[in-house]
Amino acid sequence: MKVLIIEDEKPAARRLQRMLERHGVAVDQMLHSVAESVEWFLNNEHPDLIFLDIQLSDGLSFEIFDEVTIKSAIIFTTAYDEYALQAFKLNSIDYLLKPIDEDELKVSVDKYKTFQPKGRDVQFNFEDIKKLLENPVAREYKKRFTTKIGQHIKMIPVDEIECFYSENKGTYAHTTAGRDFLLDTTLEQLEEELAPETFFRISRKYYINIHAIKDIISYTNSRLQLKLNSYDEQEVIVARERVKDFKLWLDR
């Protein structure tokens, strides 16, 4: 099986390559831009499977399809939120949400091996996906959460939450008052419920409120460490594969 990775962030591309190799999948080529990819496809035999980042350094990866007819299966990798990804689900297009989970990666590869016929031209209509990514429809996000304390139910306004974090298979909200509350949800569910301009998932453990960030410090292995206004129980680290998207989020 010939595999190609198109990802503009080289550390993320190398991480994906290592995960694939651990599952017996060799990566034949890695590309990093729309222009480089178009040139490569015009001059090389197309692979069986492509892992394709949506947002590349010189534009949306969909622009590749405007120039070249791709004859490969595609699994998209993306940091876009769950709402935008509804268009992928409606079109039955496979995708992996960053940071990529190795178990989810294995499921996608196994699905490809089981169901994907070889030699079939890929014909996707990306118009509705592009519209959602470029002009997202306004939607309502959660304004409060509830938690049970003894016989009482407490309401926690979202703007009073500095961060959400997972610990011992539970999901907690840490408030500006310095208190932690166990919630009946998961970080994955929060992806659909939190306003993306205010909250960002920096790792598999943390969702951070932008208004709670007190300081940002360079950390080992090209990562970032965050200091929050009141949460200081553990180090809050932006995963290396999320650093680029985190910086873009800060600069909106």
Image (cartoon, helix red, strand yellow):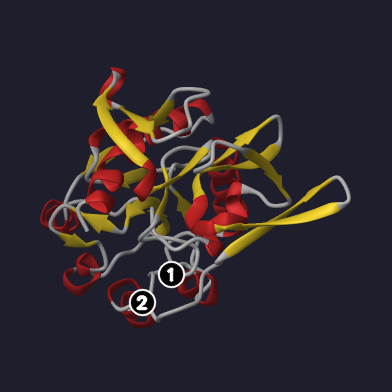
Upstream in sequence: badge 1 or badge 2 = 1
Residue sitting at x 24%, y 70%: 65
On screen, residue 156 versus residue 23, left or right, reads right
Vertical comparison of 152 with 65: above or below: above
Vertical comparison of 196 with 224: above or below: below
Local secondary structure at mark 1: loop
Q: Distance between the residues labelled 1 and 2?
A: 7 Å
Q: Of 118 and 125, which appears nearest the observer? A: 125
**Residue 45 appearing in the image:** no
Quadrant in which the N terminus appears: top left
Q: Which dot marks residue 183?
A: none
Q: Are marks 1 and 2 in contact (CB under 8 Å)?
A: yes
Q: Of 43 and 24, which appears nearest the observer? A: 24
* Residue sitting farthest toward the right: 151
Residue 245 percent location from the top left of the image:
29, 47
- Identified by mark 1, the residue type is Ala
**Residue 23 appearing in the image:** yes
Quadrant in which the C terminus appears: bottom left
On screen, residue 226 versus residue 189, left or right, reads left
Residue sitting at x 70%, y 38%: 170
Q: In which quarter of the image is residue 60?
A: bottom left
- Identified by mark 2, the residue type is Pro
Q: Of 27 and 215, which appears nearest the observer? A: 215
Residue sitting at x 44%, y 61%: 81
**Residue that carries the numbered disc 1 in the rendered image:** 84
Q: In which quarter of the image is residue 165?
A: top right
**Residue that carries the numbered disc 2 in the rendered image:** 136
Crowding at dot 2, Cα within 10 Å, few <14 / some 14-19 / many 20+, comes out as few
